[in-house]
Image: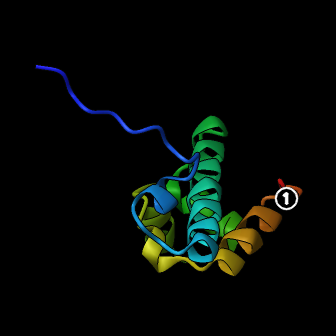
């Protein structure tokens, strides 16, 4: 039996039917969360250590590393990246 495949648009949220503008924000939030989670892991930070450096409660770090993206706005994720001393760049593609 042959399975039907559909080529991705490059944004899973567009593929799921979200409006392109909302899908762009969701994709950015997802990327920042993944980046923050990987940074915490690579730096071998405990959730308590990450919470102290980020200036948030340990339970919020737990939400972050568990991928609870609905609990974080794009603005908050950018702020957390900056608190780790990381530079944020937004690129626009035509």
What residue lies at 57% left-to-right and 40% top-to-bottom? 41
What residue lies at 58% left-to-right and 46% top-to-bottom? 10
| SS at circle 1 | loop
Q: Classify the position of the C terminus by image quarter.
A: bottom right
Q: Check the image and report above or below for 73 versus 88.
A: below
Q: How many marks?
A: 1
Q: Which residue is mark 1?
A: 92
Q: Quadrant of residue 17?
A: bottom left
Left or right of 47 in this view: 66: left
What residue lies at 50% left-to-right and 61% top-to-bottom? 14
Within-10-Å neighbours for mark 1: few <14, some 14–19, many 20+: few
Q: Classify the position of the N terminus by image quarter.
A: top left
Q: Quadrant of residue 84?
A: bottom right
Left or right of 94 in this view: 7: left
Residue sitting nearer the eye, 45 or 10: 10
Left or right of 64 in this view: 80: right
The image position of residue 53, as x and y in percent, is 71, 64
The image position of residue 9, as x and y in percent, is 55, 48
Residue sitting nearer the eye, 7 or 83: 7
């Amino acid at each position: 039996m042959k399975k039907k495949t559909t080529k991705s648009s490059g944004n899973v949220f567009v593929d799921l039917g979200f409006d392109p503008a909302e899908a762009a924000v969701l994709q950015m939030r997802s990327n920042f969360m993944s980046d923050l989670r990987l940074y915490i892991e690579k730096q071998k930070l405990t959730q308590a250590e990450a919470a102290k450096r980020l200036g948030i409660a340990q339970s919020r770090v737990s939400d972050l590393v568990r991928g609870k993206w609905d609990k974080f706005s794009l603005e908050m994720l950018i702020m957390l990246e900056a608190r780790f001393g990381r530079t944020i760049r937004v690129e626009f593609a035509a």
